[in-house]
Structure formats: C-alpha cells, structure tokens
Image (tube, rainbow, N blue to C red):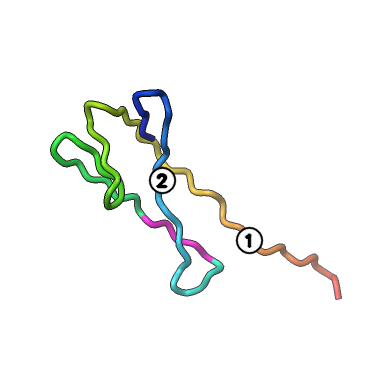
C-alpha cells in the first residue's frame, strides 16, 4: 500500500489470469516491484519517490476460488 502526502492510499496487489489449461482455475500473476535511485516502481511504469511517499507491505490474501455446487447424493 502506498500512502500519499495528503493521506490518500493506493493498494497494489498481484493480478489474476486464466490458467492455460482452462478458465475454471485462475492463477496469480506476481506484482513487479523495483527499487531505483531513491524510488519504488510498481509494475512497469508506476514510480513513487521515497522522500514523498510511505509504504506498507503486507502478505497478499488470495480470494477463495469459486467452485461449482456439489449435486445432492441420491437425486435422480
């Protein structure tokens, strides 16, 4: 999470895309972070200067996968 000088915050998290084996399962796409000359860069182009912003790093909690309902046993 990036905190802006005015108090606003922006959350950056890993992405999700369809699995190559089928759309029923999703896979996580890593969040790219670089440190370069007094700045933190998220993904390819989102740059934050270290002197102007504060950062909080937390473990990403994956959302539970949606699953199909299980049919009731004994129904015909």
Indicate the position of residue 52 as horizontal and vertical percent values: 26, 27
Indicate the position of residue 16 as horizontal and vertical percent values: 45, 57
Circle 2 SS class: loop
- Distance in Å between CA atoms under marks 2 and 1: 23 Å
Q: Which quadrant would residue 37 be assigned to in this image?
A: top left
Q: Residue reaching furthest left?
A: 37
Indicate yes or no whether the magenta region holds residue 39: no
Circle 1 SS class: loop
Quadrant showing the N terminus: top left
Which residue lies under the disc numbered 2? 13
Q: Nearer the viewer, residue 42 or 72?
A: 42
Q: Nearer the viewer, mark 2 or mark 1?
A: 2
- The residue range painted magenta reads 25-29
Which residue lies under the disc numbered 1? 67
Q: How many marks?
A: 2
Q: Which quadrant would residue 60 be assigned to in this image?
A: top left
Q: Residue reaching furthest front?
A: 6
**Which residue occupies 49% across, 48% down?**
62
Q: Main secondary structure of the magenta part?
A: strand
Quadrant showing the C terminus: bottom right
Q: Residues within 10 Å of mark 1 (few under 14, many from 20)?
A: few
Q: Is residue 16 above or below residue 22?
A: above
**Which residue occupies 44% across, 72% down?**
20
Badge 2 or badge 1: first in the primary sequence: 2
Q: Which quadrant would residue 50 be assigned to in this image?
A: top left
Q: Is residue 18 left or right of residue 3?
A: right
Indicate the position of residue 57 as horizontal and vertical percent values: 35, 35
Q: Is residue 22 left or right of residue 52?
A: right
Q: Is residue 27 left or right of residue 49?
A: right
Indicate the position of residue 2 as horizontal and vertical percent values: 36, 33
């Amino acid at each position: 999470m990036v905190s802006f000088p005015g108090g606003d915050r922006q959350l950056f998290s890993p992405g999700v895309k369809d699995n190559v084996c089928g759309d029923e399962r999703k896979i996580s796409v890593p969040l790219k972070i670089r440190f370069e000359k007094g700045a933190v860069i998220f993904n390819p182009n989102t740059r934050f200067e270290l002197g102007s912003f504060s950062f909080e790093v937390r473990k990403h909690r994956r959302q539970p996968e949606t699953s199909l309902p299980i049919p009731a046993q004994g129904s015909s």
